[in-house]
Image (tube, coloured by chain):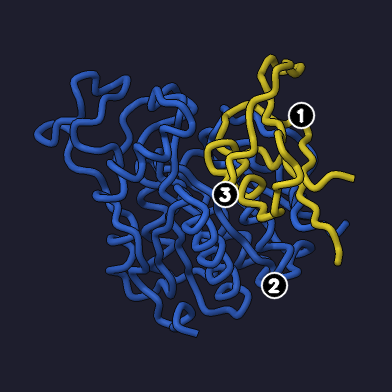
């Protein structure tokens, strides 16, 4: 199961999560969604610290964040 | 895997109709989180305004009413007086609250009704296509001020927080923004303070959120937050203007 889960049907491709990610590991995906936008996508999940800044900044609440339990 | 973040329970599954990058979505989510945290979902009643957020009732999984232009504080007064155990909040934009509904908000605040008003200030009319609002900045170009707002004919931006803070009755008047993650958390805290004060029966609370309208400002969503920081925050200064119960110190 991944740490970063996006509901592409909600994403409007505004890019706020991509701009705010402190590690700059988010980018627009190459494919288009049914809304006709390039959704946000994770490029390097191993680096993700599950800080959830992207999810809290998302105006469409499209992102869910999980963290590995130690 | 432990869940860190997901959609709050008080929010419905329906996708927002708002434009890409619109701040309404984030503020909706913060309110829904506050409702979840205070465990008041079953007795919360919201009042939606006229404007972009007119469909707010579709996005919250709580009882909702929708008031005519600017009348949300008057409708909220009625709901609160008939059902004093409920938690009543209004959610209004600047065209709704600061223009057509100025009388309603001022008098609801002056009566000290035990309600919470959330005021979304983005200095423009969103739904009707970007006309000048009472809160538009001097020199700001809009559909109805194509050469920029001129103070000689259109006056100066209205500062609602400062106006309401001069009244005796309100207990909590604050201005926040969501232009970056740190301010976003402060906004959540302000909303939590406001709803907690209402839950404790202290009186009228007013939270102004300075926010963006990327579409009608003609900016990319990411540039809109930058424009807000550079242009709106010097005019609409952040801070708490009234806190009679000292909630921010505790």
Q: CA distance from mark 3 to mark 1?
A: 21 Å
The colour applied to the residues of chain B in this rendering is blue
Q: Quadrant of the rendered structure where residue A18 is?
A: top right
Q: Residue at x 70, y 61 (%)?
A: B44
Q: List the residue tagged with mark 3.
A: B27
Q: Are marks 2 and 1 in contact (CB under 8 Å)?
A: no
Residue B118 x %, y %: 50, 55
Query: Considering depth in this image, is B30 or B204 the residue closer to the camera?
Result: B30
Q: Which mark is residue A8?
A: 1
- Report in which chain the residue with disc 3 lies: B
Instruction: Indicate left or right for B5 with B229 as reference.
Output: right
Most foreground residue, B203 or A8: A8
Could you tell me which chain the residue with mark 1 belongs to? A
| Label whose residue precedes the other's in the sequence (3 or 2) | 3
Say whether mark 1 and mark 2 are on the same chain.
Answer: no
Please provide percent x and percent y for residue B102.
36, 49
Q: Residue at x 70, y 48 (%)?
A: A48
Q: Which residue in the structure is indicated by mark 2? A: B85
Q: Provide the secondary structure element on which disc 3 rests.
A: helix
């Amino acid at each position: 199961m991944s740490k970063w889960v996006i509901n592409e049907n909600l994403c409007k491709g505004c890019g706020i999560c991509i701009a705010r990610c402190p590690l700059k590991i988010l980018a627009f995906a190459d494919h288009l969604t049914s809304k006709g936008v390039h959704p946000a996508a994770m490029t390097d999940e191993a680096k993700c610290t599950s800080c959830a800044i992207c999810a809290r900044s998302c105006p469409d609440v499209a992102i869910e964040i999980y963290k590995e339990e130690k | 895997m432990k869940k860190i973040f997901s959609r709050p329970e008080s929010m419905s599954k329906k996708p927002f109709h708002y434009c890409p990058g619109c701040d309404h979505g984030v503020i909706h989510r913060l309110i829904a989180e506050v409702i979840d945290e205070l465990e008041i979902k079953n007795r919360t009643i919201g009042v939606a305004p006229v404007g972009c957020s007119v469909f707010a009732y579709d996005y919250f999984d709580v009882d909702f009413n929708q008031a005519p232009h600017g009348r949300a504080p008057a409708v909220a007064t009625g709901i609160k007086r008939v059902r004093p155990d409920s938690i009543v909040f209004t959610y209004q934009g600047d065209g709704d609250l600061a223009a057509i509904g100025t009388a309603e908000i001022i008098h609801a605040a002056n009566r000290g009704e035990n309600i919470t008003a959330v005021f979304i200030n983005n200095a423009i009319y969103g739904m009707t296509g970007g006309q000048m609002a009472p809160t538009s900045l001097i020199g700001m170009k809009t559909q109805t001020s194509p050469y920029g707002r001129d103070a000689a004919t259109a006056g100066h931006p209205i500062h609602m927080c400062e106006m309401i803070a001069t009244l005796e009755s309100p207990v909590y008047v604050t201005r926040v923004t969501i232009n970056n993650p740190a301010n976003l958390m402060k906004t959540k805290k302000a909303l939590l303070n406001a709803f907690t004060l209402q839950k404790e029966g202290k009186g009228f609370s007013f939270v102004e959120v300075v926010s963006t309208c990327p579409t009608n400002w003609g900016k990319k969503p990411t540039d809109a937050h930058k424009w807000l920081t550079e242009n709106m925050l010097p005019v609409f200064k952040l801070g708490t203007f009234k806190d009679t119960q000292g909630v921010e110190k505790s």
